[in-house]
Amino acid sequence: MPSSTPIEAENVAPGETKMRARDVSVYYGKKKAIDEVSIDIFTEFVTAFIGPSGCGKSTFLRALNRMNDTISSARVTGCIELDGEDIYSSDMDVVQLRARVGMVFQKPNPFPKSIYDNIAYGPKIHGLAQSKSDLDEVVEKSLRRAGLWEEVKDRLSDSGTALSGGQQQRLCIARAIAVEPEVILMDEPCSALDPIATAKIEELIDDLRGRYAIVIVTHSMQQAARVSQRTAFFHLGNLIEYGQTSDIFTNPRESRTQDYITGRYG
Ligand SMILES: Nc1ncnc2c1ncn2[C@@H]1O[C@H](COP(=O)(O)OP(=O)(O)OP(=O)(O)O)[C@@H](O)[C@H]1O
């Protein structure tokens, strides 16, 4: 794959470029897991990362908010910008970065605290609420936006871990929203959920997309087709093709994409 030409999705009037990756490689020790990937991520769209197991989707996703920093063998080269700012520069505050580029993981991971405190924790440490009533407002707004308020409003002091799996995942989304992110990264957010809980999360992703740039890693091509406007297909650490989701699934340019979407491998 030519490295210096960024792959931009075509044929769609994009929102603004929110994140811009250029020639990004990620290594685990000597092993190169991502090879010179260049891509633009736009606001107001859901971008799906698809590809066979081990192709590097999660690795690249984690590079977008420096979650790979937590893996000692991981090393990132190339450039990733958020609103034109290099997120790997030495003066980037990583805590701030991860509030601006929030993350939702495969397995819901609420804190072992009350539902209220799960949401209130981030705004408190980021100074986004000055008083208890400010905080109450942020908690309610975030839970409403995550479609969970009606289900939990009478039990805010119950433990977040006592909720169902699907509710826990919406709680985690509410927790990410509470610190006013610009980008939300989701790493297979439905893989631990049943079909009904999955449908709720997919609806929620659709509701949220006008406000944030959302990037979702998914193994399910049906899910990518349902929730995303852009799809990026990865294979063996390379970004093979990136475009309008409907084009990727109906009229891919690359034979490797065609092979993947028709189930020939993966
Ligand atoms: N912490 C790690 N240390 C060493 N190698 C890793 C680590 N995490 C991932 N890898 C390797 O990097 C490559 C890409 O893995 P990654 O998890 O990003 O792929 P993926 O496409 O998200 O896979 P899956 O769909 O199975 O989750 C794989 O070869 C994997 O074994």
Image (tube, rainbow, N blue to C red):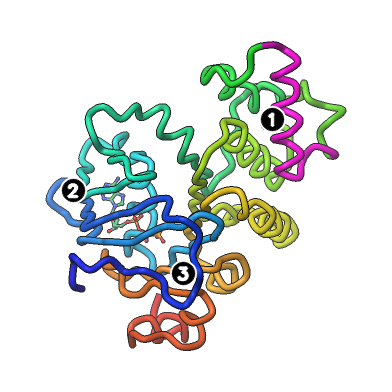
Mark 3 lies on residue:
231
Position above or below: 75 against 237: above
Tell me if mark 3 has few (under 14), some (14-19) or many (20+) residues whose alpha carbon lies within 10 angstroms of its own. many
Q: Amino acid at mark 3?
A: Thr
Which residue does the image show at 73% across and 55% down from the upper left? 200
Mark 1 lies on residue:
160
Q: In screen coordinates, is 43 left or right of 197?
A: left
Position above or below: 170 against 31: above
Observer-nearest residue: 146 or 163?
146
Q: In screen coordinates, is 164 left or right of 105?
A: right
Secondary structure at badge 3 equals: strand
Which residue does the image show at 52% across and 53% down from the upper left? 214
Q: Quadrant of residue 119?
A: top right
Q: Amino acid at mark 1?
A: Gly
Q: Are marks 2 and 1 in contact (CB under 8 Å)?
A: no
Q: Amino acid at mark 2?
A: Thr
- Find residue 248 and report its horizontal and vertical position in percent: 46, 80
Tell me if mark 1 has few (under 14), some (14-19) or many (20+) residues whose alpha carbon lies within 10 angstroms of its own. many
Q: In screen coordinates, is 103 left or right of 117?
A: left
- Find residue 125 and report its horizontal and vertical position in percent: 53, 17
Give the magenta range.
131-150
- Find residue 79 and report its horizontal and vertical position in percent: 23, 48
Q: CA distance from mark 2 to mark 3?
A: 23 Å
Q: Quadrant of residue 173?
A: top right
Which residue does the image show at 18% across and 65% down from the upper left? 4
Mark 2 lies on residue:
77
